[in-house]
Image (cartoon, rainbow, N blue to C red):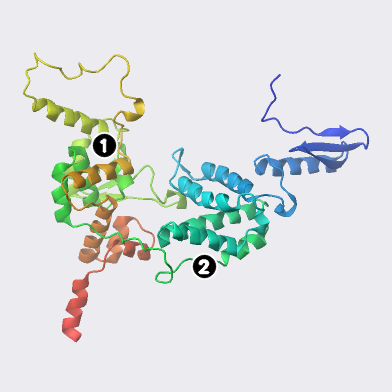
Amino acid sequence: MPRLSNALPKYRKHRASGQAIVTLSSVDHYLGPHGTKTSKRQYDRLVAEWLESDRRLLPAQGDGITIVELCSSYFRFAKGYYLKNGRCTKVTPAIKLALRYVNNWYGKELACDFGPLALKAIRQRMVDDGHSRVYVNDHIDRIKRMFKWGVGEELVSSDVYNALAAVPSLRRGRTEAPETARVLPIGDDVVEATLPHLPAVVADLARFQRYTGCRPAEACMIRPCDVDRSSDIWTYTPDSHKTEHHGRKRVVFVGPKAQAILLRYLVRDAEAYCFCPADSEAKRRAVVHDARTTPLSCGNKPGSKQKKRGRRRPELQPGDKYSTDSYRRAISRACEIRNIEKWSPNRLRHTAATEIRREFGLEAAQVVLGHSQANVTQVYAERDASKGIEVAKLIG
């Protein structure tokens, strides 16, 4: 019969000694006199710890685990923990890249021997590879987080993590690592120059995001059932958003300009996404068809060129909603073709935040952007330099 991989190790009697015994990861554990409550309680405790450690035997004080084993266990945990809507978030591949640096140099070393000097050596290697300061700091924090997780799982000693926590982050101006360009608002003139060269659905998606100041992901996933149209100002409650794991609610306020754009996309199934790539592709094909000069009696008719077999793979078919990546690629492609300054959808959020802060103040920008703290809003909303100039004229 096939071996049951999910079966629990058995509580058995060791005939020679009369003790209860259980075998975990090929190691026998004696539990005390067979049949007693103490031995069964010991059995339950050991099996629970063994299951919690992903069916791996925990070495004494974690001294026997290697770096590669620690990385493997942590990555399995990360794939099951960093999930959203049943799919891995972007944190998971970032963790994989960070752990690759650790494995390449220290994979065969014991986790208890990994210290601050080893972490600094990995950090310098990232710098030598040309990565930015922010990128390096993020990866080093992920490595520290792995050892912190290992302490909680009793895989490594707390002394190892405490020593790594003493390694400071790279500071601006005090390292050879290059700085990343700051994300700034995009001018409305650049946006207006780009919109005519975008597919109609993507252009409306960009306009909606610009008027509401929502995140690109929130704009992509809007559905008719998520929009409350009972008052003059509509409210859009995303089914999922960036900070929902903190227990926060996100409400996007939809004003008259955004309503005029969204109204054209609400006549569909309540659960369907408003901005649909399939609709965009259908409109593109209709435009191409209207521009054809060949009579319909000659050449191919719409749909006649599709083969019965060998059609496009399902993953290449237009989807039911835009992702943040496909949304960004559509804009980048239009900018490259027309030689326009390249910009990303998230800069529309910066533009909206800056305008709101200038006209209505920081608190209004905080509410519209959905931030719980004003210092986060200041990252998106640029200060109005004209106010400083006005003050200087009066008191300077």
* Residue at the disc numbered 2: 168
Foreground residue among 152 and 66: 66
Vertical comparison of 136 with 31: above or below: below
Say which quadrant the C terminus sits in.
Answer: bottom left
Query: Disc 2 on helix, strand or loop?
Result: loop
Distance between the alpha carbons at the discs numbered 2 and 1: 46 Å
Vertical comparison of 216 with 283: above or below: below
Q: Which label lies toward us, 2 or 1?
A: 2
**Where residue 190 sits: x, y (%)?**
16, 53
- 308 horizontally vs 139: left or right: left
Of the two numbered discs 2 and 1 on the same chain, state the one appearing first in sequence.
Answer: 2
Identify the amino acid type marked 1.
Cys
- 224 horizontally vs 38: left or right: left
Hey, which residue is sitting farthest bottom in the picture?
A: 396
Say whether residue 228 is visible: no
Q: Residues within 10 Å of mark 2 (few under 14, many from 20)?
A: few
Query: Disc 1 on helix, strand or loop?
Result: loop
At horizontal 62% and vertical 62% (from top left) the residue drawn is 115
At horizontal 29% and vertical 52% (from top left) the residue drawn is 346
Residue 221's tag is none
**Where residue 42 sits: x, y (%)?**
80, 43
Tell me where residue 364 sits by quadrant: bottom left
* Residue at the disc numbered 1: 274
Foreground residue among 171 and 381: 171
Foreground residue among 205 and 103: 103
Q: Are marks 2 and 1 in contact (CB under 8 Å)?
A: no
Say which quadrant the N terminus sits in.
Answer: top right
**Where residue 309 sits: x, y (%)?**
32, 15
Q: How many marks?
A: 2
- 379 horizontally vs 9: left or right: left
Identify the amino acid type marked 2.
Pro
